[in-house]
Image: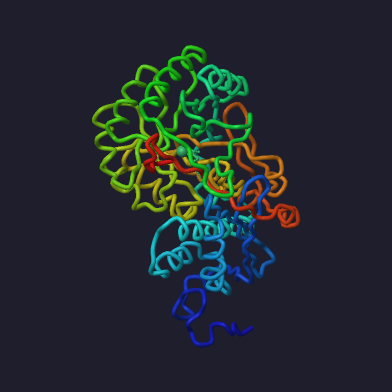
Amino acid sequence: MMDTSRQDGFGRDGSASDDSASKSGVRARITAARVIVTCPGRNFVTLKIETDQGIYGIGDATLNGRELAVAAYLEEHVIPCLIGRDAHQIEDIWQFLYRGAYWRRGPVTMSAIAAVDMALWDIKGKIAGLPVYQLLGGACRSAVMVYGHANGKSIGDTVEAALEYKEKGYQAIRIQCGVPGLDATYGVSKHKTFYEPADSDLPAEDVWDTAAYMRVVPKLFAAAREALGEDVHLLHDVHHRLTPIEAGRLGRDLEPFRPFWIEDATPAENQDNFRLIRSHTTTPLAVGEIFNSIWDCKDLIQNQLIDYIRATIVHTGGITHLRKVAMLADLHNVRTGCHGATDLSPVTMAAALHFDLSIPNFGIQEFMRHTDATYEVFPNSYRFESGFMYCSEAPGLGVDFDEDKAKLYPYKRAYLPVNRLKDGTMFNW
Ligand code: KDG
Ligand code: MG
C-alpha cells in the first residue's frame, strides 16, 4: 500500500528518500503521543507514545518545580514532529530533537528528549519481546546495588535510622542530619519514610550556616562508623553548599571514616572547581544530578576530577545519551551513580535499572521508595532485596502507567525551597 506521507520522497522518518535505513527493517509508525501530568503525592510528567502496531511506550519527563514547562515543550514542540516517524529509529529521532531544535541542551529540552527516548526504548523492547537491558547489550551483573537515605534531626536519630536501613539489608546508606541552629536542613525529612522537599506553593526560604554544617558532618560520620561498623558504605550529599576549598577540608575531615562518596560538594558550572577539591582530599567525589548533557561533565571526566557521575536518564536526554556519558566515563575510571530521588518517576527508576545492569562501569544507584499511590499510578515489577534492586524481565521497561488512576491526582504547583545566609544573602539550595 502506498505510504502517502512519503510521496514527495521526504518522509517523516527523517530520511531524504525511499532508501532510508528504516526501509530495510520492521517499522512501527508513531500514531499518537500525549503528556499526562499527575500528582499522586508529588508531580510527575509522563509521555505516552502509541504506534500503529498497537504497542505503546512510556517515558518520564518530570523536572521538579518546572513540570509544566516540559509538558508544554513536549506538547507544543516535540509531539507534532513525532507523528508518522518510525519508533525504531531511536538514535535518529534523538538527533532530530537535539540538533534539529537548533537550541541545544538545558534541563527542559533534555528532559523532554529523555521522555521520548525512554518511551521508544520501551516500544522497541515490547516489539522485540525483550527487557530493555537485553537490547543494550545484556546484563553485566546480576543486580544493582542501591543506597537508601537515612536521616534525622540529630546525629543520634540519623544513626538510628541508618541502623534500620542496615537491618533491612542495605549495604550502602546515605546519612544526612540536621544542622544545629537551623530549622530545616536539606535531606532531613519531616515525615519518617518519605522526603519531598518540593512541598510548598511558593518557595520556602531556609537559612544556611556553613560553619555549623562543617562542624556537625564529621561528628555524624564518626558516630555512624562506630555504630554501623566497617562493612557498610556511607554516603553524604553536600547539595552544592560549599566552596571548593571548604569541600576539600570536609573531604579531608571525613577521610578517617572512609565515605563511599561526598556528593555535589560544590556547584559544578565551573568544572575546574573540582581540581581544587581533588588536590586536597582522597574522599571520592560524585556530582551530576543537575547535569543535562555530556558537555556538563566532559572535563570532569576526562581530567579524572570525579569518581562517580550522577547524571540521570530523565534529565540527561534519556538512555541513548546517558550511555554515551557512561562510555566516556569508562575510559577515565569514572563509575556511574545515577540520581534516583522520588522526583524521578518509577519510569525513570525502571529505565535506570536496565541501564545500570547493562554498562560495565556501574557504581551504585540511588533509590528512594515512592508512595503507594505513586506505585498504583505506575504499576511495575522491579524489586529490592538485600541491598540490591532487580529489574523486571517483562518486555520493554517493565513499568506501566494507569491513566485512570492518574486522573485522580491533579497537578499541584510545588516549589523546592531556596536558601539564604543568616544576613539574607541568597545562597545555593
Ligand atoms: O529535585 C531535587 C532533588 O532531586 C534533589 O534535591 C535530591 O539531591 C538529591 C539527591 O541526591 O537525591
Ligand atoms: Mg543530591
In this picture, is 43 found above or below 124? Answer: above
Where is residue 195 drawn, in percent x and y?
A: 58, 36
Q: How many marks?
A: 0
Residue at x-position 46% and y-position 15%? 225
Residue at x-position 68% and y-position 42%? 381
Where is residue 363 drawn, in percent x and y?
A: 44, 35
**Image quadrant in which you'd find residue 220:** top left
Q: Between residue 33 and residue 63, name the one nearer to us.
A: 63
Where is residue 380 drawn, in percent x and y?
A: 68, 45
In this picture, is 427 found above or below 151? Answer: below
Q: Between residue 50 and residue 246, name the one nearer to us.
A: 246
**Left or right side of 298 for 222:** right
Q: Give the image's coloring scheme.
A: rainbow
Where is residue 267 drawn, in percent x and y?
A: 35, 42
- In the picture, which quadrant includes the N terminus? bottom right
In this picture, is 393 found above or below 278? Answer: below
